[in-house]
Image (cartoon, rainbow, N blue to C red):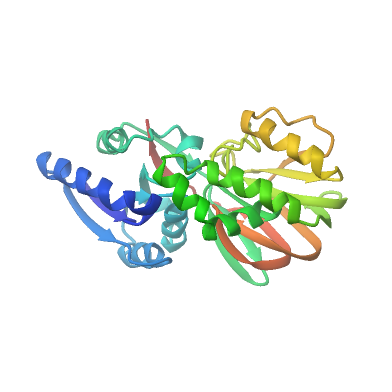
Amino acid sequence: MSYIFIVNPHARSGMGGVTWDLIEPELKKRRRHYRVYTTEKPGHAEKIAREVTADGKEHTIVVLGGDGTVNEVLNGVEDPGKITLGYIPIGSSNDFARGLGIKREPMDALETVLTGERTVELDVGVISRNGKKRKFAVSAGIGFDAGVCHQVCLSRWKVLLNKLNLGKLSYAVVALDRLLKFSPAAMSVQVDGGKEETFQKAYFAAFMNLPCEGGGFRFCPEALPGDGKLDLLVVADVPRTKVLLFLPMALLGKHAGFRGVTIRRGSRIRVKSEKPLPIHTDGEPLFLRREVEVCVKEEKIRVITA
C-alpha cells in the first residue's frame, strides 16, 4: 500500500515537525511506500489534498496535525468516497481522534494506520452560508462556541498551554472570558423541514457529527459518526451563571436535561439569528453570518481506527 502523508509541522506550536522526524525513520525501517507533503501556511493542506486527489483514483491519505488540518484536507478532497483517511493527532483539541477512538500517542496512531485492520465510515457535514459551502468532520457551530474558536486562534494561552501539553484547556480558559463578553441573540431553528423553534436569548447552536468539540466538551454524547444525521445542541434562555454551570457538566456529558439545553437530530438543519454571529467548522473560524444551513453529504469517508 502507498500512503500520502500531509504533515502540518506547526501543529501544537511546532510539535508536528518534531513528530514527523520520529515517524519518517519508522516508515523507512518498515520499507513502506509513501509520499510526504509539508504544509507551509493556513489553507495549504486543502490545496495539497485537491492536487493529489485530482486524478480521481482511490488514495490513502494520512494527516499529521490537528482538527484544523483534517478540515482542510477534507475540503480539498473532491470525492470523499474514494479516500481512506488515517490520522496522527498532534493538535490542541484532538476531538476528531477522541470521537473515533484513535490513539493519541503518535507512534501508536502510526501503528494503527500501518496495520489498517479497521475502518469506520464517517459522515461528511456541510455548512452553507450566503452561497458558500464548507465541509466539516467533527462539528460546526454558530454563536458563542464559534466565538471561542475564533479567539483561541489568536490567544496566547493556546501557545503557552500547548508547551505544557495542556492545549485543550485553552478552549476552557477562553470560553470563560468570552462568556462574560458575549451577548445572546434571538435564534430560530428548523430541523428536517419540521416546525420552527424560536429561542429568545440563544448563546449558540452546535452541529455535531462526533460527540465532542473544543477539546473534550461532550456537547452531544450520543452523536454517531455514520448515521447520516447531525446532532444539534442549542443553549438558550438562561442566565450566564447557568451557562457557567453547563460548561463543566458538558465536559462530562451530563448536561442533557438542564433547563436551557435543547438537543435535536436531523440530516438538514437551518438556523436564523437576529444578528450576525461567528461561525466555525472543526474549530476553524468563518465570517459572521445571520443564517446558516447544515446537511450531511451522501458520500462518506473511510477513516482508519483502532
Q: Quadrant of residue 275?
A: bottom right
Residue 291 vertical position relative to residue 261 in the rendered view, above or below: below
Residue 65 vertical position relative to residue 40 in the rendered view, above or below: above
| 295 and 290: which is toward the camera | 290
In the image, taking residue 131 as reference, residue 261 lies left or right, namely: right
Q: Residue at x 34, y 34 (%)?
A: 105
Q: Please identify the quadrant where the C terminus is shown.
A: top left
Rendering coords of residue 297 (x, y %): 56, 53
The extreme bottom residue here reads 131
In the image, taking residue 103 as reference, residue 251 lies left or right, namely: right
Image label count: 0
Whether residue 62 is visible: no
Rendering coords of residue 305 (x, y %): 39, 34
Rendering coords of residue 264 (x, y %): 74, 40
| 179 and 274: which is toward the camera | 179
Q: Please identify the quadrant where the N terminus is shown.
A: top left
| 153 and 287: which is toward the camera | 153
Whether residue 33 is visible: yes
Q: Quadrant of residue 184?
A: bottom right
| 220 and 2: which is toward the camera | 220
Q: Residue at x 54, y 46 (%)?
A: 170
Q: Residue at x 72, y 50 (%)?
A: 179
In the image, taking residue 232 as reference, residue 194 lies left or right, namely: right
Q: Residue at x 81, y 40 (%)?
A: 241
Rendering coords of residue 33 (x, y %): 16, 49
